[in-house]
Image (cartoon, rainbow, N blue to C red):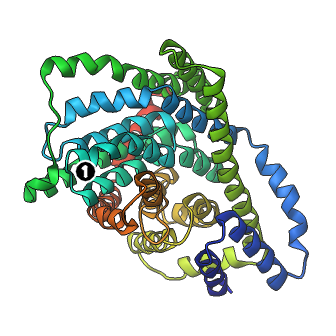
Amino acid sequence: MLFTSFLMLVVLLALALPVAAVLGLLGLGLGGLFSPFPLWLGMAELNWQHSQEYILIAIPLFILLGEIMLRAGIAERMYAAISQWLSWLPGGLMHANIGACAIFAATSGSSVATAATIGTLAIPQMEQRRYNTQLFLGSLAAGGTLGILIPPSINMILYGFLTDTSVPQLYLAGFIPGFLLAAMFIVVVLIATLIKPHWGGVSVETSWSARFSTLPNLIPPFGIFLIVVGSIYAGWATPTEAAALGVIAGMALAASYGRLSVAMLKEAIEGTMRTTAMTLLIVLTAFFLNFVLSATGMVDQVNQAILNLGWPPLATMLFIIGMYIVMGMFMDTLAMMVLTVPILAPVVVALGYDPVWFGILVMLVCEAGMITPPIGVICYVVQGIRHKGELTDVFIGIAPFLLALFAMMGLLLAFPQIALYLPELFIRSQAM
């Protein structure tokens, strides 16, 4: 039954149906085939119950913050500043791509928004400065994935909701792995351009005076980051309230730049509504499918199958990671999280692992899924901004960055404190 379900999922996705439609149809089909009860009658109740969750309100608020930052010119000024500071390295603007993605990720909370925003700013420079097309596009796609690992993160909010794990602790756990992974992406570019210097393109002309003159452009994104994250750890706001504070700060900055207008707000709100509708429809249909899987006994089958393997915890975790990577090749990451986390998190905790640590590992495998063919949603976003050439250029370009992602997973398995040090430090400070 489990194999049949997965096969049906792959076939429906291969038909290029919308992900939410696939999940809804699969839930209805499995409920009709394997349950004597009309499970479809529970869909409305489930959707109403989950759509009222307070913490999920943070999702459209963080999406709106990203939309405002893009239209207010904050991201454009930030990218110009980072290009002045990082373009001296071998690889030039590819380092700026990764650095700008890391900083924008620390305010927007969305990988798709991060990749789309920085890609829009960076791709015009690619041909003009004669960069290697594949590596340049790969740096954008890989950098975009940082949006779900570096706090604040929409995916971490969803994980916290699914597992009843503290979102502030998840945010703290994401800092070191997030910026360490960004550094590893930069090292990938360095190695590639040291081996093939002509891939590094034409350097950006700069000087120390030009660099220092751009520093004020880095203050707004850091300011928003401090408002959002700082208000959470100061105990002044919940993650949802912090997201609302970020939106207010973004609007204030837009007004200071002379970009705040009714037309701009209309565009930002329309963009937010489109993205939120798509995101939450996927989440809600995935919740229904998860309900069907639980009601038909498939969840218990998976739990028992994993526990009955009798493998050591590390071997079991490697198996789970491998399963996630394969699933990520075919599934949307939000849907994958809603379907698998409620099933696997109790198993992982029973093996002796920390749920906060597992949350960061889930973010990493989701990152891999976002840039792994054939789905690789971030790759499609980058190619869509490019408007020409072949999608295979992006898929080839992300290959070395995927290796860095796998290396980061290995480090997290070998040294769990990479993720747990800051949350444990925070808990100790609260107890004093």
Work out whether residue 260 or residue 129 is closer to the camera in this orientation and state it. Answer: 129
Q: At which x and y percent is residue 199?
A: 15, 55
User: Label 1: which residue?
Assistant: 184
In the rendered view, tell whether residue 17 sits above or below residue 68: below
Q: Does the image show residue 241?
A: no
Q: Quadrant of residue 141?
A: bottom left
Task: Name the residue: 68% across, 56% down.
Answer: 283
Q: Quadrant of the N terminus?
A: bottom right
Horizontal side, residue 35 vs residue 401: left or right: right
Horizontal side, residue 409 vs residue 74: left or right: left
Horizontal side, residue 389 vs residue 89: left or right: right
Horizontal side, residue 400 vs residue 113: left or right: left
Q: At which x and y percent is residue 246?
A: 56, 25
Task: Name the residue: 41% across, 43% down.
Answer: 120
Task: Name the residue: 33% across, 44% down.
Answer: 124
In the rendered view, tell whether residue 401 sits above or below residue 3: above
Q: Does the image show residue 37?
A: yes
Q: Secondary structure at mark 1?
A: helix
Work out whether residue 216 or residue 355 is closer to the camera in this orientation and state it. Answer: 216
Task: Name the residue: 60% across, 20% down.
Answer: 248
Q: At which x and y percent is residue 89?
A: 14, 41
- The amino acid marked with disc number 1 is Met
Q: At which x and y percent is residue 128?
A: 24, 45
